[in-house]
Amino acid sequence: MPPPPLKGVIDLAAEKARLDKKIVKADADIKRVDAKLGNEKFVAHAPEEIVEEEREKREAAVARKAKLQEALERLKMAS
């Protein structure tokens, strides 16, 4: 069986740790935005463009997290 193509090219443990750290940050970003959007006062009183901006931030964080998780899965399969 040939060695995984990434072995020796990158430090798999370091890359996994880096991805894990970024996933935790994306989770924190999602929770922070969810807290804002879950606050009825914020949603009722903030300008609509600010509320929409927060929704877009959440979507971006969710997409970023999904990509990071995919990369982590690929990395696990490569090791």
Image (tube, rainbow, N blue to C red):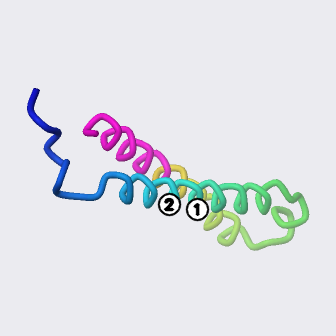
Identified by mark 1, the residue type is: Lys
Q: Helix, strand or loop at disc 1?
A: helix
Of residue 27 and residue 72, the one placed in the foreground of this image is 72
Residue placed at 25% from the left, 39% from the top? 78
Quadrant in the picture for residue 74:
top left
Q: CA–CA distance between discs 2 and 1?
A: 5 Å
Q: Is residue 70 magenta?
A: yes
Q: Are marks 2 and 1 in contact (CB under 8 Å)?
A: yes
In the shown orientation, is residue 23 left or right of residue 52?
Answer: left
On the picture, is 55 further left or further right than 34?
left
* Residue displayed at 58% across by 62% down: 25
For mark 1, what is the residue? 25
> Which span of residues is magenta-colored?
65-79
Where's the N terminus, which quadrant? Answer: top left
Label 1 CA crowd tier, 10 Å (few <14, some 14–19, many 20+): some
Indicate yes or no whether the magenta region holds residue 19: no
Q: Quadrant of the C terminus?
A: top left
